Image (cartoon, rainbow, N blue to C red):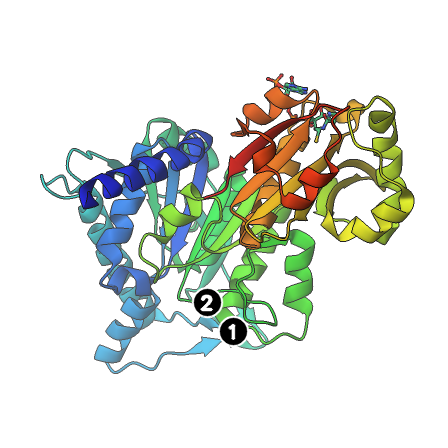
């Protein structure tokens, strides 16, 4: 019995992951982790998860840090470690340590990715890994009177070469090191390299594996998602953020502003966090999304007029149930809208029922000029995310003409019994709408 339950659970969760597996195939993901992750006990597991992503067809660029490894080497030689503005001043001794540490860490990662022992998660893996001179650097130079010596900044990324290796199904592994046309070596920040690579490649995702710095709101709840604007406001707000989170947010804003669609901040201490983030609905970190020319957001009272204008023709046709302005004003907090250049072009509402685990999705509409571009799906996804966050386990919808649209998105035909009690009492038999439901576990 126990085994059968486990089997069922496995099958269910594997099936739930299927849409994400399809969605991520052939996508380009840039993943950056610090030297702390490399030195940690769970690093082999992280590498196994990376290998799994590779085997699912995700194009991966990995960037590793070396800070603790360099510090350990410098300490061992009794050298003084100097930082200015959070950047290491890389003198000749430090550069020697950086070279040694970067070489060692890179080899350790390559070795882990080359494993293929039977009875390990890497059995049968056979992964090609490429490193090389993809990053051109220049010196930071002298700033405010401080000479940063061999500490550099990114000047150029050879994106064409990286793309070629990714197309050949190889993982590209980069150290925080760059070379200058004068033949010198520069120590770079791994975050900066990752941001430049992700921006240059217009990567689908840039993932920061942080040292446990989860973004939380004022009530200590995890922040699931930030728009580019939210991220900027947070960075410039008076909220106390640790240095590392500040840097990540700064890089995320830079990346989102230069063509990276999504940036994820994940706590690398959580076992399997990459898999949770990429293959479950709710993810496990904070997602920062690039701003678009239009936005999907919770509605406010100023949107009532726009929503009424959008849904009026659909009400007239009997596709949507009629709502008065007064009712809409009362219920506005249930709505999400898509606003484009000041016009409401899409909306959807989530009505939780008294039974807290059940909610109704209603009033889903996209302006006909903007059909067939995924906006309906985006609204549905946001409603589902909101429902999930509110602990709702089942969504129901009443529809007269859109049944197939819902069926194609995981809804199943139901009956009156699936409706919340209050809704049953109000059911309009003349409309003869069909009931569909979707489980959100
Ligand atoms: C249903 C609706 C919200 C979809 O919006 P959208 O932004 O066009 O949706 P998407 O772009 O995510 O999906 C488009 C896909 O759905 C299909 N589709 C659209 N309406 C459909 C319907 N009534 N039945 C089945 N499929 C439908 C399109 O053909 C397209 O499929 P394709 O990509 O394979 O060609 C929009 O058509 C609408 O506002 N309809 C009127 C209101 C309505 O019926 N609301 C639901 C009642 S609660």
Q: Nearer the viewer, residue 73 or 39?
A: 39
The residue at the far left in this view is 118
Q: Answer with the quadrant where ligand 1 appears in the image.
A: top right
Mark 1–mark 2 CB contact (< 8 Å): yes
Q: Which disc number belongs to residue 242?
A: 1
* Whole-number angstrom distance, CA of label 1 to CA of label 2: 8 Å
Residue at the spot x=84%, y=21% of the render? 317
Residue 94 picture location, percent across and down = 32, 70
Q: Is residue 57 left or right of residue 122?
A: right
Coordinates of residue 412 in the picture (x, y in percent): 52, 28
**Residue at 58 percent of width and 43 percent of height:** 384
Front residue (pair 428, 441): 428
* Residue 137 visible, this angle: no
Structural crowding at the residue carrying mark 2, measured as other residues with C-alpha within 10 Å and reported as few (<14), some (14–19) or many (≥20): some
Quadrant in which the C terminus appears: top left
Residue with the mark numbered 2: 213
Question: In the image, residue 216 lies at what x, y percent?
Answer: 55, 67
Query: Relative to residue 399, is residue 244 drawn left or right?
Result: left
């Amino acid at each position: 019995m126990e085994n059968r339950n486990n089997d069922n659970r496995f099958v269910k969760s594997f099936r739930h992951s299927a849409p994400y597996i399809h969605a991520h195939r052939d996508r380009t993901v840039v993943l950056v982790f610090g030297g702390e992750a490399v030195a940690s006990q769970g690093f082999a597991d992280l590498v196994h998860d990376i290998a799994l992503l590779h085997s699912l067809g995700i194009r991966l660029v990995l960037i590793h840090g070396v800070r603790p490894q360099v510090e350990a080497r410098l300490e061992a030689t009794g050298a003084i470690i100097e930082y200015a503005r959070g950047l290491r001043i890389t003198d000749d001794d430090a550069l020697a340590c950086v070279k040694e540490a970067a070489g060692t860490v890179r080899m350790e990662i390559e070795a882990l990715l080359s494993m293929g022992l039977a009875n390990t998660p890497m059995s049968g893996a056979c992964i090609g890994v490429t490193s090389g001179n993809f990053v051109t650097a220049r010196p930071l130079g002298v700033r405010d009177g401080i000479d940063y010596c061999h500490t550099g900044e990114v000047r150029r990324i050879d994106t064409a070469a990286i793309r070629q290796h990714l197309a050949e199904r190889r993982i590209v592994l980069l150290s925080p090191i760059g070379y200058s046309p004068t033949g010198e070596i520069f120590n770079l920040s791994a975050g900066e390299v990752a941001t430049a690579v992700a921006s240059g490649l217009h990567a689908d995702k840039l993932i920061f594996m942080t040292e446990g710095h989860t973004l939380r709101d004022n009530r200590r709840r995890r922040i699931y998602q930030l728009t580019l604007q939210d991220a900027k406001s947070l960075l410039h707000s008076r909220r106390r953020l640790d240095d590392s989170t500040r840097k990540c947010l700064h890089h995320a804003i830079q990346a989102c502003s230069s063509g990276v669609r999504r940036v994820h901040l994940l706590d690398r201490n959580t076992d399997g966090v990459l898999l949770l983030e990429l293959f479950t609905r709710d993810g496990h970190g904070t997602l920062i999304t690039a701003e678009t020319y239009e936005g999907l957001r919770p509605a406010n009272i100023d949107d009532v007029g726009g929503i009424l204008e959008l849904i009026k023709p659909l009400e007239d046709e009997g596709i949507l149930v009629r709502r008065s302005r007064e009712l809409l004003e009362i219920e506005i907090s249930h709505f999400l809208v898509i606003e484009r250049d000041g016009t409401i072009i899409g909306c959807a509402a989530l009505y939780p029922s008294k039974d807290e685990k059940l909610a109704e999705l209603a009033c889903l509409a996209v302006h006909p000029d903007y059909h067939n571009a995924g906006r309906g799906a985006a609204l549905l996804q946001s409603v589902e995310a909101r429902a999930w966050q509110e602990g709702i386990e089942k969504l129901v919808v009443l529809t007269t003409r859109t049944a197939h649209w819902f069926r194609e998105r995981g809804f199943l035909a139901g009956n009156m019994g699936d409706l919340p009690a209050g809704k049953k009492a109000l059911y309009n038999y003349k409309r003869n709408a069909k009931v569909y439901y979707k489980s959100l576990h």
